[in-house]
């Protein structure tokens, strides 16, 4: 439950959601991320730390730069588990609906 709370807290902030959006196409350095926002570098670092603690991004060092990448599995697992717990209704895919309609 603690990990789930960290994910939803991280997602509650618009800037952090935008950072995740920026990372959707691949890795970016902390400087590249910061250059896309009108807030200070230290503020971006704080947001990245929160995203990292929630396991929504991962980092690696490349000489003196920190490179960030999205961890989409963590988000998908957390949201799927949450939705399954709250609303345990079987969700049919479009393909399943078509098959079901064809058999009628």
Image (cartoon, rainbow, N blue to C red):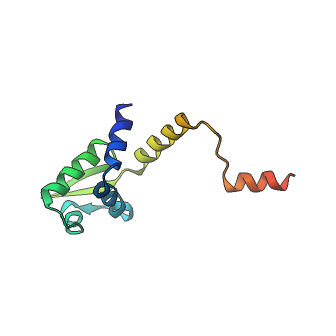
Pick whichever, 11 or 58, lies toward us: 11
Residue 43 point in image, percent of width and height = 16, 55
- Determine whether, in the image, residue 103 is placed left or right of residue 19: right
Residue 44 point in image, percent of width and height = 19, 57
The residue sitting at 67% across, 48% down in the picture is 92
The residue sitting at 18% across, 53% down in the picture is 45
Residue 50 point in image, percent of width and height = 25, 46
- In this rendering, is residue 101 above or below 80? below
The residue sitting at 87% across, 52% down in the picture is 104
- Determine whether, in the image, residue 24 is placed left or right of residue 45: right
- Determine whether, in the image, residue 57 is placed left or right of residue 89: left
Q: Quadrant of residue 8?
A: top left
Q: Quadrant of residue 55?
A: top left
Question: Which quarter of the rendered picture does the N terminus lie within?
Answer: top left
Q: Residue furthest right?
A: 104
Pick whichever, 13 or 33, lies toward us: 13
- Determine whether, in the image, residue 99 is placed left or right of residue 90: right
Pick whichever, 37 or 33, lies toward us: 37
């Amino acid at each position: 439950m603690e990990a789930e709370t960290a994910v939803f807290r991280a997602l509650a902030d618009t800037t952090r959601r935008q950072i995740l959006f920026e990372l959707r196409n691949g890795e970016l350095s902390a400087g590249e991320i910061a250059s896309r926002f009108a807030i200070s570098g230290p503020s971006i670092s704080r947001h990245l730390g929160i995203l990292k603690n929630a396991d929504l991004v991962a980092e690696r060092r490349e000489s003196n730069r920190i490179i960030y990448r999205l961890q989409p599995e963590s988000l998908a697992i957390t949201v799927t588990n949450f939705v399954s717990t709250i609303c345990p209704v079987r969700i049919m895919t479009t393909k399943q609906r078509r098959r079901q309609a064809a058999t009628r």
